[in-house]
Amino acid sequence: MKKGAILTIAVSTFLIILSFAIFIGGSLILDRDISDESIFRGDSGEVFVRYHDTYSVYVNDTYSCSETTVSIHDDDWEYFFEDCDFSYVDGDWRYIGYLNPDVSKNLQVESNNEIIIVNDLADASIIFTTLCSLPVCCSGIIGIFIGILLLTRRDKKRKQKIIFQ
């Protein structure tokens, strides 16, 4: 019984260490340069977008939202929605809006300042990786608790009483 308790505690400790590694690894990935994740960088050109993905658009931090005009379109439709957030600056880039296309195709990009377009699914996978550490850590804590209970549990054997008449 003691071997099982020690094994339970060892595996649970490993799970807790693994959860911290996953959490720290996900956090380090979050601390990156957003321009490395961009699918478009410049002031004009074409960008390929996928159906129902969401993309964030950023302008160089030296420009404000009011100084920047952006158009991301095809022949029939404008896909860019201005949603300026003066407080959201990621590195050297200021968030100015988003696009959520209902088609998978190349779109025309026109802007009077340098912009980048980032697929938001890249951020979602990083956050998912970081959140995966939570159930692993909880499993480890529960396992340590069970291991300690097993370790401290005394085996009480029933004593048989023999009565002679």
Image (cartoon, helix red, strand yellow):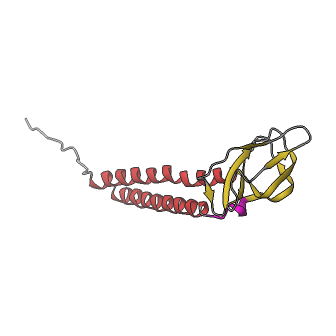
Foreground residue among 16 and 28:
28
In the image: residue 112, left or right of residue 20? right
Residue 54 appears in the rendering: no
Foreground residue among 107 and 109:
109
- In reply to whether residue 36 is colored magenta, the answer given is yes
- In reply to whether residue 158 is colored magenta, the answer given is no
* Residue range (magenta): 32-37
The N terminus lies in quadrant: bottom left
Foreground residue among 161 and 138:
138
Q: In which image quadrant can residue 158 be found?
A: top left
In the image: residue 68, left or right of residue 144? right
Relative to 155, residue 16 above or below: below
Foreground residue among 130 and 67:
67
Residue 128 position, x and y percent, is 59, 50
Which residue sits furthest right?
75
Residue 75 position, x and y percent, is 92, 41
Residue 88 appears in the rendering: yes
User: Which residue appears at 82% of the width and 47% of the height?
Assistant: 71
User: Which residue appears at 68% of the width and 55% of the height?
Assistant: 64
Which residue sits furthest front?
67
Residue 134 position, x and y percent, is 49, 51
Residue 32 position, x and y percent, is 63, 64
User: Which residue appears at 78% of the width and 50% of the height?
Assistant: 69
The C terminus lies in quadrant: top left
Q: In which image quadrant can residue 73 be found?
A: top right
Q: In which image quadrant can residue 36 be found?
A: bottom right
User: Which residue appears at 61% of the width and 53% of the height?
Assistant: 88
Question: Main SS of the magenta segment?
Answer: helix
In the image: residue 145, left or right of residue 40? left
Which residue sits furthest top?
165
